[in-house]
Image (cartoon, helix red, strand yellow):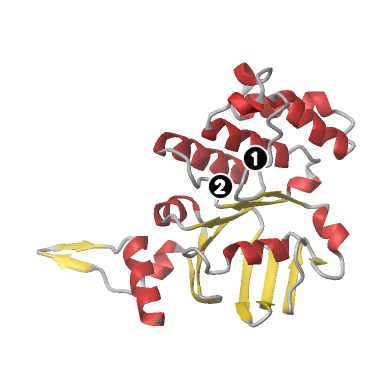
Amino acid sequence: MENIISVSGLRKSFKSLEVLKGVSFDIKKGSIFALLGSNGAGKTTAVRILATLSKPCGGKAAICGYDVLKQADEVRGCISLTGQFAAVDESLTGRENLQLIGRLRRLPDTNRRADELLTAFDLEDAAKRLAKTYSGGMRRRLDIAMSLMGSAKERQVIFLDEPTTGLDPQNRIAMWDMVKNLAGEGATVFLTTQYLEEAEYLADKIAILHEGVIIAEGTLEELRKMFPPAKKEYIEIQPTLEEIFLKIVGGAQ
């Protein structure tokens, strides 16, 4: 598979605070990539740069073959972004929120696309209710649906910045299934998370970001090979991602 995202030596500082210190990684088309790290590691900063919302201080990044700095308009034309906090207008209904985005994107089939997403995200029964009456899980589903109102081209790469933060276990699992479905439909999903089980369940490839540096990267199996399995009697017990994360981050300190 070809790389749809390529990042090399990405740097970002805010005055004297260096947030990203030469971050590099590649993401295959149609895969789920998880950028894993604790609060303050630099995950959201990386997403903002890739989504053309912030300019890097150094390094290069390309999405769909377009340079994020020199061809920002082209990059924005092939991505969608769901940030950490829901960008839902609470004074509008669920359907009206989707229709608003469709009009802003000048979609020719706004109503049809809105109906498709309401069905896909299990929001049909709540379509005519004001968004302020929605639960946290429903609001998050609507938020992601709004980011998918664009054309198929605009849904090639989907950025989800900590999409399950604040959700209860049931809604978190439902969100995981939605992410899997998005990748199954051909989209490339870039997911940031601080939940180890989320990355373990979803990601084809995981990168661990610690204090602005990628300190480990690979599939779950590749990360496991970095540490021998524990042996209990005659059974080998593979380390969990949580155990791997703690060992890698602990060793980097």
Tell which residue pokes out farthest to the left in this image. 233
Where is 29 relative to 115, above or below? below
In front of the other: 147 or 221: 147
Label 2, on which residue?
163
In front of the other: 214 or 86: 86
The amino acid type, in three-letter code, at marker 2 is Pro
The amino acid type, in three-letter code, at marker 1 is Ile
SS state under label 2: loop
Q: Earlier in the sequence, mark 1 or mark 2?
A: 1
- Along the horizontal axis of the image, is 211 left or right of 110? left
Total marks placed? 2
In this rendering, does residue 20 appear at all?
Answer: no
User: In the rendered view of the protein, which quadrant contains the N terminus?
Assistant: bottom right
Q: Position of residue 168 (x, y in %)?
A: 43, 38
Quarter of the rendering containing residue 213: bottom right
SS state under label 1: helix
In this rendering, does residue 209 appear at all?
Answer: yes
Q: Position of residue 38 (x, y in %)?
A: 46, 64
Q: Position of residue 219 (x, y in %)?
A: 47, 64
Where is 41 relative to 78, above or below? below
Kindly check if marks 1 and 2 are in contact, taking CB atoms under 8 A apart as contact.
yes
Label 1, on which residue?
144
Quarter of the rendering containing residue 200: bottom left
